[in-house]
Image (cartoon, coloured by chain):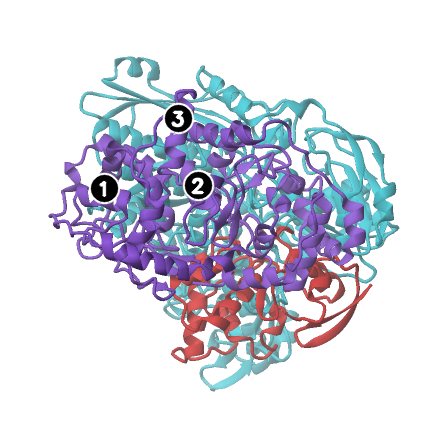
Amino acid sequence: MTITLTVNGVDHAVDAPPDTPLLYVLRDDLALNGAKYGCGLGQCGACTVHVDGKPVFSCVTPVAAVAGRRVRTVEGLGTVDTPGILQQAFIAEQAAQCGYCISGMIMRAQALLDGVRRPTDAQIRAHMQPNLCRCGTHGRILKAVRRAADMMGGTVPQAVRS
Amino acid sequence: MSDGIANLSRRAVLMGLGAGTFILAGGLAPRARAEEPSKKYGGDAMPGGVKDDPRLFVAVAADGAVTILCHRAEMGQGVRTSWAMVIADEMDADWAKVTVDQALGDEGRYGNQNTDGSRSMRHHFQALRRIGAAARQMLVQAAATQWGVPVAEVTAEHHTLMHGPSGRRLGYGEVAAAAAALPVPARETLVFKDPARFRYIGRGDVGLVDGFDITTGRATYGIDVRRDGMVYAVVARPPVYGGRVVHYDVDEALKVPGVLKVVVLNAAPPPSGFLPKGGLAVVAENTWAALQGREKLKITWEDGPNASYDSAAYRAELEAAARAPGQVVRDTGDVNGALKTAAKRVTAEYYIPHLAQAPMEPPAAVAQVTGNKCEIWGSTQAPQATRETVAKVLSMPTENVTVHQTLVGGGFGRKSKPDYIAEAALLSRAMDGRPVKLTFTRQDDLHHGFLHTVSVERLEGGLDAKGKPVAWLHRTVAPAISATFSAGVTHEGASELGMGAVNTPWVVPNLRVENPEAVSHTRIGWFRSVSNIPHAFAVQSFVAELAAAAGRDPKDFLLDLIGPPRQINPADMSDSWNYNEDPVAYAYDTGRLRGVVERAAKEAGWGKPLPKGQGRGIAAHRSFASYAAAVVQVTVGAQGKLTIPRVDIAFDCGPVINPDRVRAQLEGAVTQGISLATLGEISFKAGQVQQNNFDSYEVTRIDAAPRDIRIHLMPAATYDAPLGGVGEPGVPPIAPALLNAVFAATGKRIRSLPIRDQLRT
Amino acid sequence: MRRKHWVGAAAACIALGGLAALAVAYRAPLPAIARPDAASFDRARVARGAVLAAIGDCAVCHTADRGAAYAGGRPLPTPFGTLYTTNITPDIATGIGTWSLDAFTRALREGVARDGHHLYPALPYEHYTHVTDGDVEALYAFLMTRPAVSAPPQPNHMIFPLGFRPLLAGWKLLFLHRGALPPRTDRDAQWNRGAYLVEGLGHCGGCHTPRNPLGGEETGRAYAGGVAEGWVAPPLDGSSPAPIPWTADGLYRYLRTGMDGEHGAAAGPMGPVTHDLSAIPEDEVRAIAVYVASLRMDGRPGPGPGPVDHADAAAQAHPAGAALFAGACGGCHEAGAPMLTGGRPGLGLASGLQLEEPANVVRAILEGLRPPVGAAGPFMPPFANSLTDGQVAEVAAYLRARYSDRPAWTNLTRESATARKEGQQP
């Protein structure tokens, strides 16, 4: 069955059974590795992408459900030369350890900052709760989200790729 | 500066190389002072040893671009950054011109590559300095030759070679070809940089080399590898360790669109080591089809002798064993007599369940068999074990297996075991050489792991009338890691006992450690900090219990138990292992243990009053040749709701190479320690793991992580001091400090991990 | 929908209340006292109060999301507007620090604050009125020994003119029946204990009994099912639609852990209730379970119809819903799925799929389920962002067809849109 997907602004015709979770279509068919498999059952958030601007677990989002809707992955946040502000903030805080959860963290955080300009720490924690990090970089992830909010508010100079 | 090393460095001046430049002569590293010069320690004692030939690790292009090869697995320690940083600093390279490449798995060529045991910097820092220094000296020599001037007149500074007298300059790239053709300088002629001139080492502001790729989704982990013509596989493995397939029906599975083949994998009988468990593999055109196909398999299993493995019953077995005398593994004085005559006697039993490493990236790899060769792309901590295991299952020579190491999305010990890579290799052969991506689902990961052991630790202590400890009896009972590799192993090995069971430096006249038998029923493996977890949990909890019985402050009691600063040869504590390090250079230094205790206590405001329902706990532990002490502060609220506002951890690992990454490792260790203490448990019923995913094998999330983690590094005064490990030693003190804090807050002593809802009632 | 006639009936309430108010509305203020020293309360009584507070779900309503315990501020959407719960910590300025035991007792039993103003029946005083003196005193001791938190009350947003509190006096004339409930001599002590807890502090009927247009419980239809924050509180009487009837043992497991293998997981507002009950003495929960089970046994004893699974027919009728289910839900809910081990039931046993209205199924899909007692979660993830209202409707229709023999639900898309909107409220 051919399904038309719009991913990061580009239309793709994908031949996949309608029940296929979006995660596997992104990774296997579209060669977008940003969304990660972590649990397959919506328990860890490593696969978080946006559908119509809202965060979803792509591992439990059937591809049929997103036909005709806007899908955004971590690859769509910035360009190679200028990563998105959140990405810059994660780089600046050295928030990654193994880095495997980071794409999902960034997408989850982006959804927060899209709606709340200045989230409190409590809001960040509550919002980021669905996403698991096993290395224990939570403190830096929190700082990175805070830094990104500051950068968007213009109080921290935007970092450039070093 | 200490003893001989400082004297040695003065020779730099004698040689006329200018003040502030230091020389290190080969063979005069601390290990040369060991009692048995013939016995090798540290990296030299590892299979493959340590290699320091700059031609293996450094390439300088004509445009000056420097490529540094890293042969360690990057799994979050930041080793690719720290590794290259050391070489770059010693060779005076400009970090902006450095890129890092990952070495193929080749122990013969690169030396020991297994990334485990907190060894990367501990074993390689001096070798990396030698690599950098040699590269720099070759560049200097090439410039001197080109200019026709004495080599002593040429200096290297930030990617530029300078001839002082004439003011001439050359870039590194301009002499790279000539330098590469030069012989590598002998070790004893290498001149190290003055640490005062370090730009990167010890500075902590170097950006992670993989930071950009990771945050933009471009990084490649084992699960991300894609090869032309690749197919996807998952395996249905026997639910019980040692089980096998007796009957199967694959008709329905083969009907799933996209499923290509179902392959029977043979089971290796226990103890199966690194070999796959066997089962039925479904190979398909994409991941989803493989998963759907596996759901449709109909398999009858024969479970074998481990079908009765039950965690509740096993715990009772371990407890029974711990209540009777066992093999004595350390004995000083007369423990039984001292216990009998003690004014006060305290007994406690601690339980620490199985744990799964559960790295966020489950085990995954791609294999491609071509003729009598096999190529692997995978997330592995152990490329050499991978080559050997793949070679074994494919019956081909080890050198025919090529291993490309990807980024590792979390390892924690799980990816030291290449069972999943061997499965991929077998399947590629079964698919006539097509590349096969083998992925573990999360359930596969939890059900088919190499788990942290399960243990009961029983301690008995005696106090005299003044509250001074006079007797210490510790019985540690746990199935051993080596039982996964050899039949009939029922006792902990020297390395397990040396992780905090026998090697306690207590000032107690009568001290005995026993190790009763325990039979293993599942695959036991390494989990970040390994047996230090149960041993430190029990020992450091018990110290606080004794302090409470003595009516003493737990920190003061702990310091008294550690006693005055002194260097203890681990062998004197019946620790023959000492992380394979020289027992003299890496003696157990009680002064350093005291140092971290005092620092953590001071920083955490130990002794300052806290409101009702709050408390602080302290614990300290030496592991992987480093010293760590933690003070955890807790609040226990309504219905036993536990929150952790703050953790202070003081850490002494000797020289600190990359402070930012040391901090990051400790931050992670704190959270992982909290996670295992509050939530972590893998349990068995009828031989099967009961947890399937992160709903039942829970991991600390951002809302429950400590609010404030403060790291207090206590770096050695000199970079010539022996290095301790960094990745693991932060974990062991966390659980006991946490439970000691819970006791301080509530008066409730929890001895069985995880805490879960034990505080609710 | 129930919601509609609730709102429509506000006018009747006003008229009636207006008359009554004149007669009985005035209540005198009780004197403020100096805040009692926490140490002056008997420790055993405080401990007993903690258990009673858990049974009464005090913290559930009187704690805001991530707010301090008992400091109030949680919004309670009702058909008559949104109420904000009050601070019941012993803070002097913003809490109940100056309340005497008499003032506290009057509030609990008569719905009158210390200063004499009438409290909305969101505080279930029509149930709490049955609580014994000793238990009220223990509750008081417990609350007065909590940490005082300064949290000023938030203004309510009530439909005009229900902001005029004297009207509540009229409501009380109709629905507040004071005094202790007589014990039933034909039942044993455990049953009577359960009755006392369920009818009193537990106030189970507050959600599980339907309400009349004035917002009073329909006593003639006790436990025939009601609503709570948009969720259906299923019937506990003989009309319970559970495919396997509830037993005292099953109820005990459910109340204690938030999960029963023959029924399912506590969802929506029931989740926090089970969290509370997980930490109190086992006997109390057993008594509650025995009493609640008797409600069903008295009405309709005997076995239930058991679960059904019309997988093929449902897939034929709702192919889109079937595909969405396979990709979004099957990983946990299909037979043999990993989430179905450890005593978790299949969807064939879930009451929500058997109810007359789809509210619970739609809400569970949209909002997911919070983790059970003692777990970190997530448990069932929310699908509000993944699925459109139309897709939620497809899945719900498929589930109904697959797992029940009952009539198809209608207006599912609209139900999803409504639930989605409500889920985003404060």
Checking the image for residue C192, the label placed there is 3
In this view, B206 is above or below B539:
below
How much space separates mark 3 and mark 2, taking CA atoms?
19 Å
Q: Secondary structure at mark 1?
A: helix
Q: Give the image quarter of residue B553.
A: top left
Q: Classify 10 Å Cα crowding around label 3: few (below 14), some (14-19), many (20 and above).
A: many
Expressed as whole percent of the image width and height from the top left, the position of residue B698 reads 52, 44
Checking the image for residue C219, the label placed there is 2
Chain B colour is cyan
User: Viewed as shown, does residue A15 lie left or right of C415?
Assistant: right
Expressed as whole percent of the image width and height from the top left, the position of residue B743 reads 31, 36
Q: Give the image quarter of residue C392.
A: bottom right
To the question of a shared chain for discs 3 and 1, the answer is yes
Checking the image for residue C105, the label placed there is 1
Earlier residue among tags 3 and 1: 1
Type of the residue with mark 2: Thr
How much space separates mark 2 and mark 1, taking CA atoms?
24 Å
